Image (spheres, helix red, strand yellow):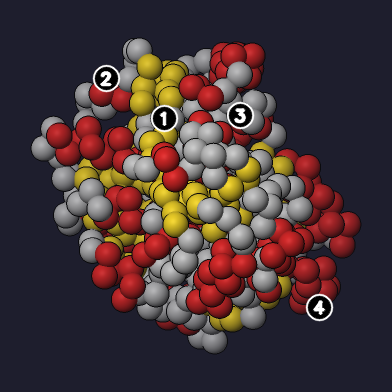
């Protein structure tokens, strides 16, 4: 008799774990996925075309709040936890809930979920959301391309739409994102690479994605999401740590796994971090991963028109996931507001509408900042309406993309750009020489 399984997820790691470990495994029967974190990703079906011959009707994706009822209704044997950027305490509360009902609670290890590539793989992951993975990925791609290497980036999944259509996604031009109905969260990750001439793959089936990407790449660059571990076996595993959240490298799942497995750890944002906090991160590296090489780096920011900030009442729009499940109290937009002398940061919370107001209720510690949430067209409209409702002189856009490409901002706006700048040696140039 097969082991009945539920896979807990958030439309990403859960599908990958199913595809590589459970899809053709006769010892298991996956009863359902559960979904959380992202709005409107439950109450749909993981389609039969993706699920394989053992699941001719597909697999239901149900709300995580119904987990206990699903376990009991189907006499489930094992629950597999498969999403990221949550505290160890949170994970163990889920384990206790599952164990209390009588089922097993399972975390799959790296060896069970890493696919091997025919091409060299460099992975960029982090200990928390918002550490600076994207700017690190951009820096690595620039170095490799300057040496004549053809780099293809494969991005951690964000399949929030039609899963069949999103099985394998390839993005080369801005128009590709529009044609495939990308959310703001997807565009924030793809656009900075596309504008540098890097082809980006993403989707649902990362075996199929790898097979296609290998045809046009000298080097595969895994661009991680949240603080999740890579999907491909890396020849070089680079992990970014954030001294603005010292100690978090040991407190969050699966960020600590990345921290312990890393070949290279980048301590980012040192230009704005407290010296004692940097020391804490270094001590933890020495204690828990002494083999890792350490790169020290700054995250300098720039705006084209700082005069639009100085002395102005500003609304700061920050990267959504960084403020929400990343738990950061500020981002690049806030740093820019302070650096260039804003008179006041306007609190948007009382003016938030519909789904944006719901976001503030769900994440009450975001502070007087506006997370750029846009997981669907309705939420994008709510974001625009919230911005319009705020009486300010300037909107500071601290997101990785220019929001003016997605929504109409009536107020004057400035965009904050930021990049990775290494300090001393070793630096990424040195680390990447074998590639």
Secondary structure of the residue carrying tag 3 is loop
Q: Position of residue 47 (x, y in %)?
A: 49, 80
Q: Earlier in the sequence, mark 3 or mark 4?
A: 4
Q: Are marks 4 and 1 in contact (CB under 8 Å)?
A: no
Q: Are marks 4 and 2 in contact (CB under 8 Å)?
A: no
Residue 368 higher or lower than 185, as above or below: above
Tell me if mark 2 has few (under 14), some (14-19) or many (20+) residues whose alpha carbon lies within 10 angstroms of its own.
Answer: few
The residue under label 1 is 300
Residue 59: image tag: none
Distance, label 2 to label 3, CA atoms, is 26 Å
Closer to the camera: disc 2 or disc 1? 1
Q: Position of residue 337 (x, y in %)?
A: 53, 39
- Locate residue 148: give its quadrant: top left
Residue at 64%, 14% in the rendered image: 276
Q: Position of residue 366 (x, y in %)?
A: 69, 49
Secondary structure of the residue carrying tag 1 is loop
> Tag count in the figure?
4
Which residue occupies the foreground of this view, 242 or 69?
242
Residue at 51%, 85% in the rendered image: 56
Distance, label 4 to label 2, CA atoms, is 56 Å
Closer to the camera: disc 3 or disc 4? 3
Q: Quadrant of the N terminus?
A: bottom right
Distance, label 3 to label 4, CA atoms, is 44 Å
The residue under label 2 is 430
Q: Position of residue 88 (x, y in %)?
A: 73, 41
Secondary structure of the residue carrying tag 2 is helix
Q: Quadrant of the C terminus?
A: top left
């Amino acid at each position: 008799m097969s082991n009945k399984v539920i896979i807990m997820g958030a439309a990403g790691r859960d599908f990958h774990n199913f595809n590589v470990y459970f899809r053709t495994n006769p010892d298991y029967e996956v009863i359902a996925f559960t979904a959380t974190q992202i709005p409107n990703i439950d109450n749909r079906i993981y389609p039969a075309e993706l699920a394989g011959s053992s699941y001719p009707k597909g697999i239901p994706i149900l709300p995580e709040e119904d987990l206990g009822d699903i376990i009991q209704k189907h006499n489930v044997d094992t629950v597999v936890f498969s999403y990221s950027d949550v505290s160890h305490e949170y994970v163990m509360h889920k384990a206790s809930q599952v164990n209390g009902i009588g089922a097993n609670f399972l975390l799959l290890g790296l060896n069970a979920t890493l696919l091997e590539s025919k091409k060299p793989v460099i992975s960029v992951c982090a200990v928390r959301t918002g550490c600076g993975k994207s700017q690190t990925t951009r820096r690595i791609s620039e170095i490799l391309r300057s040496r004549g290497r053809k780099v293809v980036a494969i991005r951690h999944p964000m399949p929030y739409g039609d899963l069949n259509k999103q099985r394998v996604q390839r993005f080369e031009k801005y128009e590709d994102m529009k044609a495939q109905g990308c959310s703001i969260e997807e565009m924030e990750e793809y656009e900075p690479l596309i504008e540098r001439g890097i082809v980006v793959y993403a989707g649902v089936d990362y075996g199929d994605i790898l097979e296609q990407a290998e045809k046009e790449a000298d080097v595969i660059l895994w661009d991680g999401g949240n603080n999740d571990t890579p999907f491909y076996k890396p020849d070089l595993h680079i992990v970014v740590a954030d001294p603005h959240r010292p100690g978090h490298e040991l407190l969050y799942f699966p960020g600590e796994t990345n921290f312990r497995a890393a070949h290279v750890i980048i301590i980012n944002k040192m230009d704005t971090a407290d010296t004692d906090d940097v020391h804490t991160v270094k001590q933890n590296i020495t204690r828990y991963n002494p083999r890792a090489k350490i790169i020290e780096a700054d995250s300098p920011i720039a705006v084209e028109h700082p005069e639009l900030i100085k002395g102005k009442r500003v609304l700061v729009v920050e990267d959504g996931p960084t403020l929400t499940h990343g738990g950061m109290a500020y981002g690049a937009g806030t740093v820019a507001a302070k650096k260039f002398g804003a008179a006041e940061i306007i609190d948007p919370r009382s003016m938030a509408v519909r789904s944006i107001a719901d976001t503030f209720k769900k994440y009450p510690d975001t502070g007087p900042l506006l997370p750029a949430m846009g997981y669907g067209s309705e939420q994008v409209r709510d974001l625009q309406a919230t911005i319009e409702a705020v009486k300010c002189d300037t909107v500071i856009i601290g997101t990785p993309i220019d929001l003016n490409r997605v929504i109409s901002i009536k107020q004057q706006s400035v965009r904050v750009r930021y990049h990775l700048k290494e300090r001393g040696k070793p630096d990424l140039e040195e680390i990447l020489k074998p590639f």
